[in-house]
Image: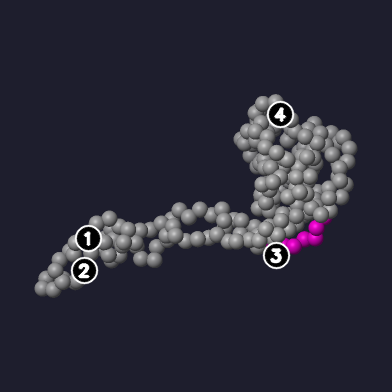
Amino acid sequence: MEVNLYNQKAEVIGNVELPDSVFGVESNNDLLHQVVSSLMANKRQVIAHAKTRAEVRGGGKKPWQQKGTGRARHGSIRSPIWKGGGVTFGPTKDVNFKKKIGKKMARKALIVALSEKARSSNIIVVDSISLNAPKTKEAAGILRLFQDKLGRGGSVLIVTSSADKNLYRSTKNIQKTGVIEARNLNPLEALSYKNVILLKDAIGALEKK
């Protein structure tokens, strides 16, 4: 698949070939759903935790004797039926939401996601984006030049071949904009953004990945 190659001023400076092995694969929504669901589950953090009667502080002594008081028998004031006692069947931090996914499935899902982006013309290839210092205003100006090609209001993911601290810091405060290295790209990240700006060097890195 041949597409236009732009510079950071949004000017066409030539053409570039996107390999069909990465950007020309047939759709597979079932695979995408399975892999993305697994990635979302693996990111889930377990926060809610209710203490059981074994975890609640206090209650080591029997409140009163078993017989002879006329009251109901109790063994601990931290029983779930007491105020301040443990919780029965409450949420615990021991729950595990992790899902395993095969490497081949994850790679194929990423290829499918990128192919969908390419078919819908949501991928733009840029020769390079060079920033001498972390400047949000400068990065926003570059993205503004590509608005006509990306569409207004659409989120943008910039895929680089290697870590670029200046680019990352410059886009950190720009809404709906992200930067990621090609080696760290996954189907969830690719589908979380409407548009992808692909730096030319990242094409080889994606093909290798």
Which label sits on residue 74?
2
Residue 166, horizontal then vertical, whole percent: 66, 31
Mark 1 or 2 closer to N-term? 1
> Going from the N terminus, do you reach mark 1 or mark 3 first?
3
Task: Look at 80% across and 31% down and name the residue there.
Answer: 9
Q: Tell me if residue 134 comes above or below residue 150 in the rendering.
A: above
Compute the Cα span from label 1 to label 4: 65 Å
| Magenta stretch in the rendered image | 24-33
Q: Which residue is drawn at 83% across and 48% down?
A: 18
Disc 1 secondary structure class:
loop
Residue 25: quarter of image: bottom right
Disc 1 + disc 4, Cβ < 8 Å: no
- Kindly state the secondary structure of the residue where label 4 is placed: loop
Q: Which amino acid does label 2 sit on?
A: His
Query: Image check: 64 left or right of 57?
Result: left
> What's the CA distance linking mark 1 and mark 3?
54 Å
The residue that mark 4 highlights is: 131
